[in-house]
Amino acid sequence: MKSSPEAYIICTTPRSGSTLLCKLLAATGISGEPDSLFHRPSLAAWCGAYGLEAQSYPSTPALLEALFDAAIAKGSKGGIFGLRLQRQSVDFFMEQLAILVSGETTEKARIERAFGPTLFIHLTRANKLDQAISYVKANQTGLWHRNADGSELERTAPPKPPVYDAEAITNHINRFRQTDAAWRAWFTREAVTPLTLQYNDLAATPSAILATVLKALKLEPSCADTVEPLVAKLADATNEEWALRYRQEHKD
């Protein structure tokens, strides 16, 4: 990259450690406030997230300019803008970006017109069985993340006990394989060489991975030394039991 990045996009899929990475980056105070700032595929949802009224703007491009300005303000810190982009959010995001940014023929060029020179980070999880189990279990129990002290960080439904569901696990294994392949195809099409990070490395050595990202952003890597992980791992004996059972049932 010829110039220092002014932005980065964490290109990922659910249950790949993106919440941990976002919290680490935000905690440095110099590397943005990354989040899923364009998560739901709906202008109404975007307006709701930023407290904007669509009817207050004379055109869709004017509304999109206000929405992107609001997102950039929310996701910026230390002169860097951070964005988490789940694969299921990409198509709608790119459609709106094409309306906002004219005169560019590639999605990468539109992104950099909107956000400045951008580092693309591909955060992925090699073990798709563990990823699928994590997703199915979180979806069933309603608990998606815990803080480092064990308290709940994100819950979307009242507590329910998890129930082993081989069909759901298989469906999500296939889903996560497809979304990873879609990200790789996008990188190839847009001539992007991403910084690729693995979930297992992030979970095992979060400070080292944070330092790697800071270095890629041309920021001081030693800032990672004082940052403590703010998100606890949710996997427990149930995850291990489900993984063992699933492998025994799908030996062929």
Image: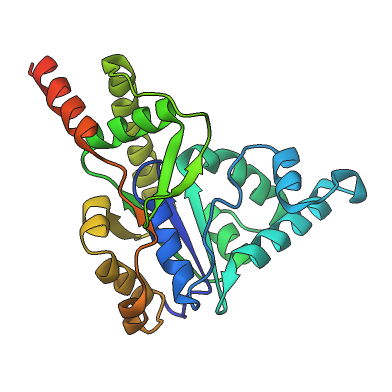
213 is higher (above) or lower (below) than 138: below
- On the image, the x and y values in percent for residue 138 come to 39, 33
Question: Would you say residue 124 is visible in this rendering?
Answer: yes
Q: Could you tell me how many numbered marks the image carries?
A: 0
Looking at the picture, tell me which residue is in the foreground, 93 or 203. Answer: 203
Residue plotted at (43% across, 40% down): 144
- On the image, the x and y values in percent for residue 77 come to 57, 74
5 is higher (above) or lower (below) than 199: below
38 is higher (above) or lower (below) than 161: below
Residue plotted at (44% across, 60% down): 22
Quadrant of the rendered image containing residue 220: bottom left
Question: Would you say residue 191 is visible in this rendering?
Answer: no
Looking at the picture, tell me which residue is in the foreground, 206 or 5. Answer: 206
Which coloring applies here? Answer: rainbow
- On the image, the x and y values in percent for residue 61 come to 79, 51
Residue plotted at (28% across, 30% down): 133
Query: For the C terminus, which image quadrant?
Result: top left
Looking at the picture, tell me which residue is in the foreground, 74 or 59. Answer: 74
Looking at the picture, tell me which residue is in the foreground, 47 or 114. Answer: 47
Residue plotted at (62% across, 58% down): 104
Query: For the N terminus, which image quadrant?
Result: bottom left
Quadrant of the rendered image containing residue 210: bottom left
